[in-house]
Amino acid sequence: MIKLKPPKTDYASLDDVGKFNMMWNISLVLVPVFFILFVTHLVYNDPSWITSFTAILLALSNSLLLYKTRKYKLAGIISTILAVLISQSVIFLVNDSHIAADVMWCVLVGIFSFFLFGGFIGTFVLLLNLSGLIIFLMNGGPEEIIGKGVSPGQVNYRMVVNVYYVALALAFILYKMISNNQDVNKRYELEIQRNEILLKEIHHRVKNNLQIISSLLKLQAAESENDSVSEHFDEAINRIRSMALIHEKMYHNDDLSKIDIQSYLVSLTEDICSSIGFDSNIEFNVNSEIKKVDIKSIVPISLIFNELITNSMKHGFAESDSGEINVEIKVKNDRTIFEYRDNGKWKEPAKKMTFGLDLLDTLTEQLEGNFDRKFDNGTEYTFSFETETLFFKER
């Protein structure tokens, strides 16, 4: 089903995005416009109904082509060629079409070509279209010329000079307008690139600062002779590292508005295993319908998974040579479901993990979700969140 809003494209240039959106909007708008014209022609028994019906088919075909291919240049080339043919067919085949309407359609096709393909092609299409009208008037019989609303005495070389002079003046004005718009787009793109570089640098510096904090906490933990205190320090360090990993991913990411959840979880698991010196062979599997996660929700999500993975390593696989952790992220209606399962042999009583559970409660509430957990040959957590405001489905 075709959407009224322009579909998403892979164009990086603002100029290309603008041209695609223009083609999309024009194609959709022309469908009802030409339909009304088509009905009007039928009501008044105007032979021009053939051209208006052809224009409807052209507009519909363009919309479908743009939706399927996302290639505006291909649709633009086809549209321009067919529009010129339709304009010329009206001029040469429809005897009672008025010259004012013929000129307007010729100019309209020229303007369309200007904005889509630039000054050279736009000028060529404009002059080509008007030349067809000039040729008809210069070589047509008196009755045909009168049928266009022009007296034979008005058709002379002075008329030809005036038409081409005005056409070239219009072409120059359109060219300057397009050039100015392109310059503005280039300045915007340069500004966006600068901002992206600065934002990446900020992510890099935040990551470095978080690593410094982790190092300071390690030094502080090393001075403590209390194993319980050192363990709490280690847990805090892991939570900080999980946030630092986000900024590292964003630093290397092309899209700074969202992050690849699957890649992040795999890296997070490896990082946790390395930080706690975990030597067991743990198989980590992620199956996700959601590929990209909004940057505003990735921090609480990362802390949730940091808590789950750390607990599995410390309490579920503490005495195991191998194990398995499975994460499944799926969408059901307007909810996104996170299912986390491990097959570890838990020995730590659940009531002793009060801070971890409180943290999970707080983070889940922050994301306006809820979760359940159960122990059966391992542990299983099921989280439920609103999809629309938190996550991006892959297109």
Image (cartoon, rainbow, N blue to C red):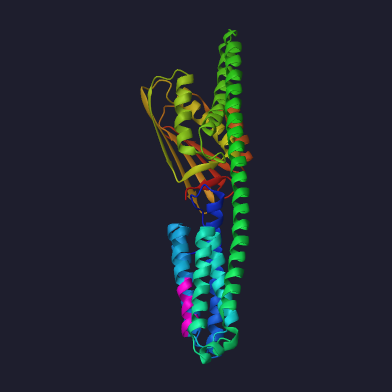
Magenta stretch, residue numbers: 83-93
Image vertical order of residue 373 relative to residue 6, above or below: above
Quick check: can you spot residue 230?
A: yes
User: Main SS of the magenta segment?
Assistant: helix
Task: Write the residue at 49% across / 81% down.
Answer: 136
Image vertical order of residue 224 relative to residue 300, above or below: above
On the image, the x and y values in percent for residue 103 come to 57, 76
On the image, the x and y values in percent for residue 125 come to 50, 67
Task: Write the residue at 62% across / 45% down.
Answer: 188
**Between 36 and 333, which is closer to the camera in this rendering?**
36
As for residue 146 lying within the magenta part, the answer is no
Task: Write the residue at 61% across / 69% down.
Answer: 166
Task: Write the residue at 53% across / 48% down.
Answer: 13
State the residue lying farthest toward the front: 157
As for residue 91 lying within the magenta part, the answer is yes
**Between 183 and 248, which is closer to the camera in this rendering?**
183
Image vertical order of residue 93 relative to residue 1, above or below: below
On the image, the x and y values in percent for residue 276 come to 48, 19
Question: In the displayed structure, does residue 369 sit left or right of residue 125?
Answer: right
**Between 284 and 312, which is closer to the camera in this rendering?**
284
Image vertical order of residue 105 relative to residue 311, above or below: below
On the image, the x and y values in percent for residue 132 come to 49, 76
**Between 80 and 35, which is closer to the camera in this rendering?**
80
Dividing the picture into quadrants, the one containing residue 156 is: bottom right
